[in-house]
Amino acid sequence: MWVETIAFFLAISILLYSLLAGADFGAGILEAFAGKDRREEQREIISHAMGPVWEANHVWLILAVVILFMGFPKAFSALSITFHIPLTLMLFGIVLRGCTFTFRHYDAVRDRSHRYYSALFVISSFLTPLMLGVVAGGALLGAAAPLEAGFYAGFVRPWANLFCFSVGVFTCVLFAFLAAVYLIGETRDPAMRGIFTRRAMIANALAILIGVTVFVTAEIDGLALARLFAARVVSVGSMISATVILLPLWIAIRKNRVQMARVLVAVQVGLVLIGWFRLQFPVIINSQIHPWTIYSAAAPEPTLRYLLYALVIGSVIIFPALIYLLKIFKLSETERA
């Protein structure tokens, strides 16, 4: 019971990080395709949407790392060693993106340096979700080899392959789709809403295309992903449900039901992640050496028990505080006054 409950908190933290911080990264990705049509206005909308909450959204990543470190230390060690390079790049992207966004958003002087800030902001917005997807793909693929096999076999081959990069690209597109739908509600200008709606349509189409590519590259790299999905009722059901939601989602967007559209796109992305979680469960990291599951990698029961106490107490404090933060900063200027 202790192990499954801790694993549930881990899955929830990853899910919330994807839905909240993922939308922030997706906004940075969308900025790369802003074009010349009202580019500055699009940047202002993105900055206004991200400004109050982008730091708070990393709470969920920190929580996931703490749960892994405390609850599943052996899996944490294996992930940190095998995926040291992509995890380092991911963290580098998080820091770089935060710095450049802060400098660009709060700098009182508007000069040429803002071009460099914007360029680095976009690059790091791509880099982090790309590496996040690469690690997720590598954890499922199971190409990790003993370190005695050499640097390439131990540190590069487990993630430097078509399947992992296709999962990384899919993650980038999924976050961009999420951000585009969220951003529709950040402006009342019909023209700007139209721009973000078109971005959402393009990202949606790309997500479907790259999703198919993920299955193809899995077969190329020796992972029978389609058969794994077929053997998991929850995974298949989640993918079917995510597809069915597309119709009411686009109806909500067309009828300017912004809040409904946001809820539906969050549910859709959540279903995709739930399908992936079920696909991998109970494995945390697959490996040629030793596949670490939530059971084989679990910490001693006393550690899990006290970790669960801390998670429950922390949830009681954190959730109301974050809801209050969003409520305060997401109110319109008129409502705030």
Image (cartoon, helix red, strand yellow):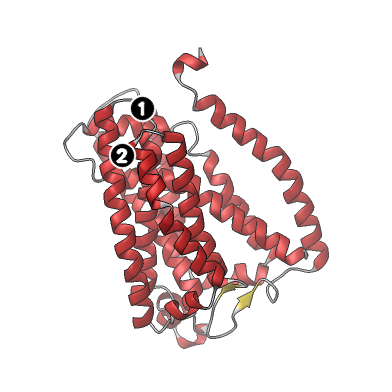
Q: How many numbered circles does the render carry?
A: 2
- Rendered image quadrant of residue 261: top left
On residue 107, the disc is 1
Secondary structure of the residue carrying numbered label 1: loop
In the rendered structure, which disc, 1 or 2, sits on the residue that comes first in sequence?
1
Q: Residues within 10 Å of mark 2 (few under 14, many from 20)?
A: many
Name the residue tied to disc 2: 117
Q: Are marks 1 and 2 in contact (CB under 8 Å)?
A: yes
Secondary structure of the residue carrying numbered label 2: helix
Q: Residue at x 72, y 60 (%)?
A: 5
Tell me: 281 left or right of 254. right
Q: Residue at x 34, y 31 (%)?
A: 45
Circle 2: residue type: Tyr
Query: Considering only vertical position in the picture, is 37 above or below 224?
Result: above
Residue 101 versus residue 233: which sits nearer the camera?
233
Q: Residue at x 38, y 54 (%)?
A: 174
Query: Considering only vertical position in the picture, is 196 above or below 244?
Result: above
On residue 199, the disc is none
Residue 242 versus residue 313: which sits nearer the camera?
242
Say whether residue 75 is visible: yes
**Residue occupying the far bottom of the picture:** 149
Residue 288 versus residue 244: which sits nearer the camera?
244
Circle 1: residue type: Asp
Say whether residue 50 is visible: no
Q: Residues within 10 Å of mark 1 (few under 14, many from 20)?
A: few
Quarter placement of the N terminus:
bottom right
Q: Position of residue 292 (x, y in %)?
A: 62, 76
**Residue occupying the far left of the picture:** 36
Query: Considering only vertical position in the picture, is 187 above or below 161?
Result: above
